[in-house]
Amino acid sequence: MKRQLKGLLFLLACVVLVQGIGAQSQSRMIRCTVSGTPNIDPGVGQDYGSSMALPNLYDSLVFPQNDGTLKPMLAEKWDIDRSALNYTFYLRKGIKFHSGKEVTADDVAFSMQRLLTVGEGYAYLFTGVVDKATVVDKYTVKFTLKKKFGPFVETLVRLYVLDKDLVTKNTNKNGKYGEMGDYGKDWLITHDAGSGPYTVSELKQQQYLSAVQFKDYWGGWDKDAPDSFKLMDTTEGATVRTLIRNKDVEITDQWQTMENINAMSRLPGVSIAENFSGTILNVMLNTKKAPTDDVNFRRALSYVFDYDSILKLFPGSAASQSPVPHDLPGFAAVSSYRQDIEKAKQALQQSKYANQLDRYPVEVLCNSDVPDLEKIGLSLQAAAAKIGIKIDIVKAPWISLVDMVSNVETTPNGTIIFVSPHYNEAGSIIESRYHSKSTGTWEQAEWLQDKSIDAAIDDALATMDRTARFAKYKAIQSKIANDIVPTIWVLDQAERRAYQSDYVYWPGAELAKAGKPVTPVMGYSFYFHDFKIFPDRKKK
Amino acid sequence: MLSFLVKRLFQGIFVIVGLSILIFIIARIVPGDPARMSLGPRAPQFAVDELRREMHLDKSLPVQYFYWAEGVFRGDFGKSINTKRAVNTDIREFLPATLELALLSGILFIILAILLGLLAAKHHDKWVDNLIRGLSYVGIALPAFVVAELLLLLFGYVWPIIPVLGRLSPETGAPTHITGLFTLDSLLTGNFTAFFNALAHLILPALALATGPLFQEARLLRASLVDNMGKEYISVATGYGLPSRVITKKYLLKPSFIPVVSVMGMDLASLMGNAFLVEKIFDWPGISRYGMNAMMNKDLNAISAVILVFGIIFFIVNIIVDIIVASLDPRIRLGAKS
């Protein structure tokens, strides 16, 4: 009896002990789940998690606003010369890096040069465009372009300015970049050299990135702003649900299934934010493979697709009205494909494959890593069967999908993929989706290779006047949507995330709730400097 | 015994070399260009070509293997295209986490399997035995990740008395690094707060991983014990009036353990490779999860390193199991001698 009593007391002591172990502290930290540990080197990172981290650790010359315009950031103002090949930026004075050193033109030129040399991350926005960056004086930097590029200033949101002295000091001399060694790449995996509102406190691979407020941030601080943030590398459904339920995370990632999102929406104090992010869901039709090499066949598929049922799978999303998502500047509503079986039949009758459907089965590929995409394939399969088109659904992991679409022979008739813009303009989507340069990549499984479209895109991008450029975008969108029809544009995706609305003020979510535009530039709706946290409002 | 060890080690070299060639080829024939995957579809060609050259992907397979093997002999597994740092660094960081998990899981399943097996055998064909057998069917049928989800639901939602995610609570600092095993390091440095915290975080993932092997081995031990209980020498010992505790300890356990030890060894070695989903669910930063991420992204250097490490661990565990079995069963020792 005594032994049993001792055992019971011991057990109770353990329970009390672990209760203490399990207890969580409260702070003004904002935690988000992300897919993959962020790459915080501005010359390397470009995925979503990295794009969330970078604007918080670094400043760029300009900053994207929710209405699609740009506001000066490190730069006070800028000039473009008559040739449109020289851009001169005048920096604000007195802005400090986290190291305490002042931001100067030398740092900006260094950052651009580094990006061009390393060639990773967002370098692709500049490598074909920028010839050189020159220091004019301490606070003036000039970019000389190789060719006219109308959206150049828009792309500068991705030029994050590094502290040249700090990077140089931490460069590994045994790197492959000559006298620049490794350009600080090893050191920048776990450190930052920025001037942004937050500075890295710890990065643990496969776990998290955490950063704390930079008290001397030139943009100042609201008293309720988060004093730190943490990006946690997990998207596992049950794990994320547990985290948000226990108030151990403030915002989830966008990869949660509809079922999980719905379950999380029922938790007290949790709301679902639905933000458009410039992402469009496409069924890319291979224009070089029978039967989707026939425009009327493609038109038939576009009319037979059941758009409404798919919209129900992605609540908050909007029906696409163009190859470009509606929230991108330069978008034009040029098409309105809706399910119309009669029109589908008529289009099919005009196709050369109308009486040979048995000989030409259609294969549609979806990424097995994203379960919801298969539902789209199945919906298309069911709809196409109504007009006699047989569709086979093929699933492949991302790595295999990327390999399959790298070759026109192995690219299936249809490939279901989300695509996002690289900068905040319609030209980004038009170029990455339909210019011949992107064939063989997962961004273009249509294999369009249309010289007239290439020329139109190049011309539009070289147009300096925004209004004129947007008019050219409109013409291209119209031609693609109505004359070529290489894609079924399923929907403009609203990213859905659960977040702790009872104590977190998320500007992007509030704007979206009010039906106002939110910047679609990837990661910028997570500019934590503008968030507010009210820990005393946390519901238990 | 020494000659046996030397012979096994010698055999092991061929096994490891063969494994390394197999991994190397399989990793490279899986579709996808790792350089392009790593840098993205719009990365300039010069950057992709540079990365391919760095990874020797522009060379023939035998030449690539030569470079890789030469690096391995120098202790350099190359760079991970995912983490952007040396694979050695990744392994040093993630291997202890999975080792710690596998060790506790192993301790749990061995101890509990022995207890349950003994209990079931002692009360064989009674309700205790039937209950344990019933639980065993369920325990073996349930995959580890399902057990993990159930434990997460129970302790994350219904009864949150124990931490469910990660290796340590955010407010608990990691102990001074000695081995990388938080429980051991904190004990060695006298940091008991970290010890209890780390242990609390270990319990659920270790239990999830241990469930299948635990019941498998319990059933096996129970069957082996019941089988040996019916043997004549046990009847003779009982007839001599020896207490049952002495019979069990001296005459029953040793021979009954022989078949179980081999299976335990296999299960112990497999824990590390099977831990991937459990690590994902409990947000455990281990090498199994790292390895799976490497495969999803065709991170060639990381894939090769992880599989080689697992292969070596499997090999070492097998040798240890052989030694234990040889010490339990004199017939094996004598057979080896003759």
Image (spheres, rainbow, N blue to C red):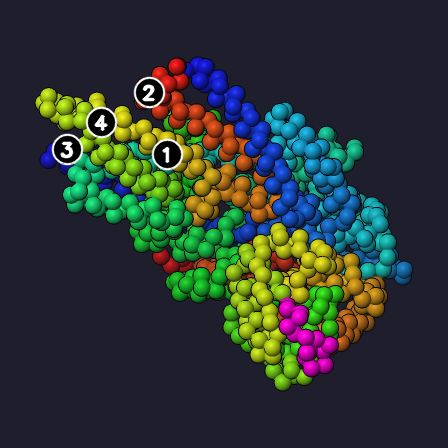
Question: Which label number is shown at residue A3?
Answer: 3
Per the rendering, the mark at residue B263 is 1
Helix, strand or loop under label 1? helix
Whichever of labels 4 and 1 marks the residue nearer the N terminus, that label is 4
Judge whether A411 appears above or below A481 on screen. above
Is B225 rendered above or below residue A25? above
Under mark 1, the amino acid is: Val
The residue at which mark 2 appears reads as B331
Number of the front mark, 1 or 3: 1
> Residue at the spot x=65%, y=65% of the render?
A414
Mark closer to the observer (1, 2): 2
At label 3, counting other C-alpha atoms closer than 10 Å, the crowd grade (few under 14, some 14-19, many 20 or more) is few
Q: Give the CA distance from mark 4 to mark 1.
A: 18 Å
Question: How far across and how far down the image is residue B171, in percent?
Answer: 43, 41
What amino acid is found at the position of numbered circle 3 in the picture? Answer: Arg
Q: Quadrant of residue A507?
A: bottom right
* Outermost right residue: A83
Q: CA distance from mark 3 to mark 2?
A: 43 Å
**Region rendered in magenta:** A348-362
